[in-house]
Image (cartoon, grey):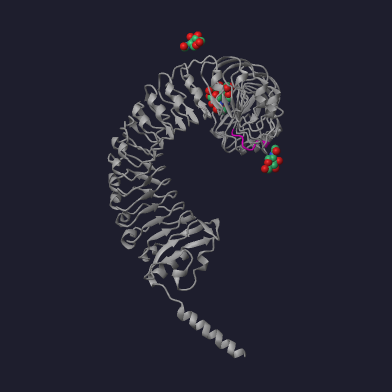
Amino acid sequence: MGSQVLWFLVLLTLTTICKSKSCHPNDLKGLQDFKAGIRSDISGRLSKWKNQDCCKWEGISCNEAGRVASIILPGLYTSDGAPVQSTMVGELSPSITLIDFLEVIDIGELGGLTGKIPTSIGLHLPHLRKLNFLGNQFTGALPESICKLSKLEEMYLQENVFSGFVPSCIGGVKNLRRVDVHSNKLSGVIPESITRLTNLESLCLQDNFLTGIIPENIGNLQELKELDLSKNSLTGIIPRSIVKLNSISILYLNANQLEGEIPPSKPGQLSSLSFIRLQNNRLNGIIPSSIGYLTSLQRLSLANNQLKGSIPSSLGNLKSLTELYLSNNQLSGQLPRSIGGLSELLLLSISHNMIEGPLPGEISSLSNLQSLDLSFNNLNMSTIPKWLMQLPSLSRIYLAGCEIQGEIPEYIAKSLLELDLSANHLSGRIPAWIGSLSRLYSLNLSKNKLVSEIPSTFTNLEILGALDLHSNKLEGSVDAVLQMKSKFVGGSLTYLDLSDNSFSSGVEQIGVGGQEHIQHLNLSHNFLKGRFPTSIETFKSLETLDLSHNGLGSYLPISLANVTALEKLMLHKNQFTGRIPEEFLKLKKLKELNLSDNLLEGKIPYGKPFLDFPQSSFSRNRGLCGKPLPPCKS
Ligand SMILES: *[C@@H]1O[C@H](CO)[C@@H](O)[C@H](O)[C@H]1NC(C)=O
Ligand SMILES: *[C@@H]1O[C@H](CO)[C@@H](O)[C@H](O)[C@H]1NC(C)=O
Ligand SMILES: *[C@@H]1O[C@H](CO)[C@@H](O)[C@H](O)[C@H]1NC(C)=O
Ligand SMILES: *[C@@H]1O[C@H](CO)[C@@H](O)[C@H](O)[C@H]1NC(C)=O
Ligand SMILES: *[C@@H]1O[C@H](CO)[C@@H](O)[C@H](O)[C@H]1NC(C)=O
């Protein structure tokens, strides 16, 4: 009985061995070397690569001739219907080029793969259609030999550390449809030959160090739907041929050094163009009125350029427009009445131009408008138009520097998320109803003539993240702000500026109110008194602390040394006494310090970062000594 079972097992084993095919030795070697290069694979996919029949291995498939045609081991995949994110750490073996019938290599988003694209890839893998290395740590240049990959259609190399130039022969890879190399360290120019890739549908080279001009004949790319060259150092003009991109939907050229005019288009051209980003360049000239032909436009950003002239009224034709960014230019004239026709508009930003008033009443038909920034123009509004505040969806309002006078009117009390009325001539009190704007997360009333205390209702602003009330004539206690309740553990306030007012309370509530996420705290230029609260150390994220020009006194608390995120510490012009605690040497990130005009004495702590500060950081105290001041006496 026992021996029968044994024989059966032997037979079974023999048949399995005989049946199990072995792949082509090149493929086997290529894959085994690949596996050997990987030090860690949390998905466990490679540990199942055991027998010789590599066509059955997970992630591998073969062509009809039994040769390996694809390696598909992405970091993001689905297993049993559930999405899995996996990482692999290790170095890509150059033996990958042994697998000479490869059509697809997809090892994207594994996070931890290093190594280079083998220089001879184009000579050895002539069948390659898709190369996906996205989201790893690959280095080195894009080898010239990729130009020989005549079947290559898709190349995803983005979010790695590739450097060097885009090979000038790239135009030879005739079948390329998608190229994404964004967020690497590529330098040099965009080869003109790229304009010969007439099958190209998307070209993403953003976020590199590319220089030179945009190829003049870019308009040849008739299939191109997406072109992203943003965040490089491209110069020269936007080529006129760009208006011939018949299929283009996404055009991002922002954050370069482009100059010259925005090329005008003809009716019918760029008819699919939906998203344009040209902001952060040096474009000049006018906004061409032909922009009104681009009726598919949904988002248009021309901010931060040097555009002049008036906003063309043809803009009103852009019925699909949802976001319009024109801030920081030199636009003049009035806002065109046609703007009222942009019924889908959610956001309008024209700040920092020279737009004149009055505002066209047609704005009142923008029933979807959520965010409006008219700050710093020549609007001379004197009052906030009531009709403006009746826009049903408006919740983010920026009217800084609009020459608004009088008190803050109650008719603006609506469900606001952001309100900026800074740099106006507002007078009177801060109304208590502001404390009931429960969705408010940014309030800027700085640079006005507001008097009064901070209403106690401010403690109800549960999600307020930024509060700027600087340069007013506010008085009383700062406690209402420091005690703001928060919906979130640790508080939501990150930015607080109450400087340049007439507050006269103590600051004991700093750090006890539960607002621990504050990064920027400026209470300078007030009449604050009392001692420095030791509870400051709960402000673990504090980067800027300015309590200068007040009447604060007593010792500097050692606990301040525990606020190690601190970069700027301004305590000058107070009455602090005692020594500078040695423990302050723990403030390694400190870049600016001013302790001058106090009553401090003793030796200045010796070492970095204190050695970097000038004498004027310590001058006019009772008796400080040691570097950078004269040495202490014995
Ligand atoms: C702004 O408007 C006010 C009141 O309407 C007017 O008195 C003032 O002259 C205007 N200022 C400018 C610069 O136009
Ligand atoms: C508030 O407005 C002033 C003046 O317009 C500006 O300088 C400041 O940066 C704004 N504060 C915040 C937090 O944005
Ligand atoms: C704090 O506010 C004062 C007055 O508004 C300003 O001069 C100073 O630069 C601010 N401090 C910091 C560190 O930003
Ligand atoms: C600062 O933090 C350390 C540990 O991080 C703690 O031991 C010490 O008590 C704290 N110092 C002060 C003065 O609060
Ligand atoms: C420190 O503040 C004093 C005024 O109290 C000023 O004269 C000096 O220039 C400041 N120094 C630095 C380094 O900020």
571 and 97: which is toward the camera: 97
- Residue 79: quarter of image: bottom right
- Residue 342: quarter of image: top left
Residue 388: give x, y in percent of width and height. 54, 21
494 and 24: which is toward the camera: 24
Figure quadrant of the N terminus: bottom right
Relative height, residue 202 to residue 348 (above, below): below
Q: Residue at x 34, y 62 (%)?
A: 125
Q: Which residues are magenta?
A: 538-543
Q: Is residue 43 magenta?
A: no
The total number of labels drawn is 0
Residue 495: give x, y in percent of width and height. 60, 30
Residue 384: give x, y in percent of width and height. 55, 18
Q: Residue at x 31, y 44 (%)?
A: 222
Residue 485: give x, y in percent of width and height. 70, 32
436 and 33: which is toward the camera: 436
Q: Is residue 539 magenta?
A: yes
Q: Is residue 370 visible?
A: yes
Figure quadrant of the C terminus: top right
Relative height, residue 165 to residue 404 (above, below): below
